[in-house]
Amino acid sequence: MKRLRRRPLTVEEILRWADAHREVTGKWPTKDSGPILHAKFENWLTVDNALRQGLRGLPGKCSLAQLLAEHRGARNIHKLPPLSEEQILQWADDHHRRTAEWPTQKSGTIPNSGGEKWQAIDTALHLGARKVTGRSSLARLLARHRGVRNRKQLPPLTEEQILAWADAHYRHTGAWPKRNSGPILHAPGETWSGVNVALNHGNRHLPGGSSLALLLAERRGVPHEALRTSLSREQILSWADAFHERTGQWPNVKSGSITGANGETWPAVDKALRRGYRELPGGSSLAKLLAAERGVRSRVSLPPLSRQMILAWADAHFERTQTWPNASMGAIPEAPEETWKGVNSARGQFRLVQWLSWSPGPFLSGSFAGSLPWQTQSPEPAGFVGENHFGLG
């Protein structure tokens, strides 16, 4: 069968098709744009191929992208025009005048640039493409030529500079700055949290291992918990005894200032016990100290329970009330500060009434047998290991 010969094409005809395509879609066509509008049996891929190979009367050694770049000024991503730092800075200045901000690589398309994008500019500066030097970036270029702050290359800091900023903050506010005090006056882009991180980690030419609070304590005498006078467990217990005698309760971290202790507070004492400040060993807390030395009940360090203990309380409850306890029955008279709800929580996922039904004892036999309709002589549940189930002693 004879092969059908395609009719000849001209550059002018292709350009007319491209103009129509742009008018309809708002974009110049590419070889992947599919069928050509109003040109039966034609598509952009075959047109691009004819331009490249010189088919159908075309001269060849061209492409659709090159043709549109030459005759319509369309952007050809495979043959981008050269860049210069002067041109990039001009676009950046225009952006700043228009938005009051300097561009970043995420600032999108550059107006009046023929389709340039800030991300592509940053890539070219990084790779040295399009006749720029390379090993740079948009942020570095703006920092060098326009003084724009580059978060990845921040200027060095000194303790003297930080102290000067702190003094100005104190004069302005009447208080010394903290790490959460926000932006630093008269230091564009700097924040107290950033300064604190630099002091702690040794960034920006600082030695590290410090903090804003420690620096102000050492150089300006601002009180700091780690540098205050030493504390002892005996002194803390003495304050706690006085608090208990005065209020009938033991102190906790929410108890506020310590009466007669010259600015000491219970939360500061708790922190010193936990972190080892002020010559204390650390690893403790106010609650743990009072539990160990004064027998104060601590929710985070409750005494162990045993199965025999719980069953004894349950038997006593039954003798008093002729009903077995459940989690809503309040305090346990035989165990000061214990409640059935707390005991139930100690049993983990199993409800108190379920556990009692599985436990052998006098309430499952004799006069107590059958007193609860759900009680049976069924074996203990899978996973029940007697005395130590769910952490009970």
Image: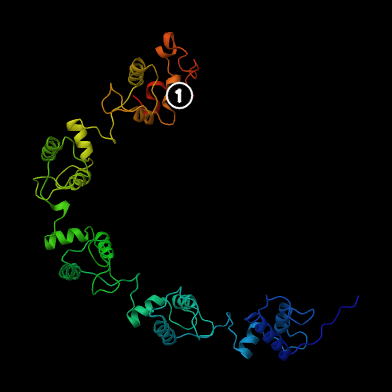
Residue shown at 25%/64% (left/top)?
Answer: 181
Please tell me whether residue 197 is drawn above or below residue 375 in the rendered image.
Answer: below
Residue 235 quadrant: top left
Residue 8 quadrant: bottom right
- The C terminus sits in image quarter: top left
Instruction: Using a 10 Å C-alpha cutoff, classify the residue at mark 1 as few (fewer than 14 neighbours), some (14 to 19) or many (20 or more).
Output: few
Is residue 257 something one can see in this rendering? yes
Q: Nearer the viewer, residue 263 or 53?
A: 263
- The N terminus sits in image quarter: bottom right
Q: Position of residue 144 (x, y in %)?
A: 34, 80
Q: In the rendered image, which residue does mark 1 sit on?
A: 354
Residue shown at 27%/28% (left/top)?
Answer: 337
Q: Position of residue 10 (x, y in %)?
A: 74, 90
Please tell me whether residue 247 is drawn above or below residue 74 in the rendered image.
Answer: above
Single out the residue that lies furthest toward the top.
366
Is residue 384 something one can see in this rendering? no
Q: Position of residue 319 (x, y in %)?
A: 35, 14
69 left or right of 348? right
Single out the residue that lies furthest toward the front.
321
Residue type at numbered disc 1 = Gln
Q: Position of residue 54 (x, y in %)?
A: 73, 85
Q: Nearer the viewer, residue 283 or 316?
A: 316
Residue shown at 15%/36% (left/top)?
Answer: 244
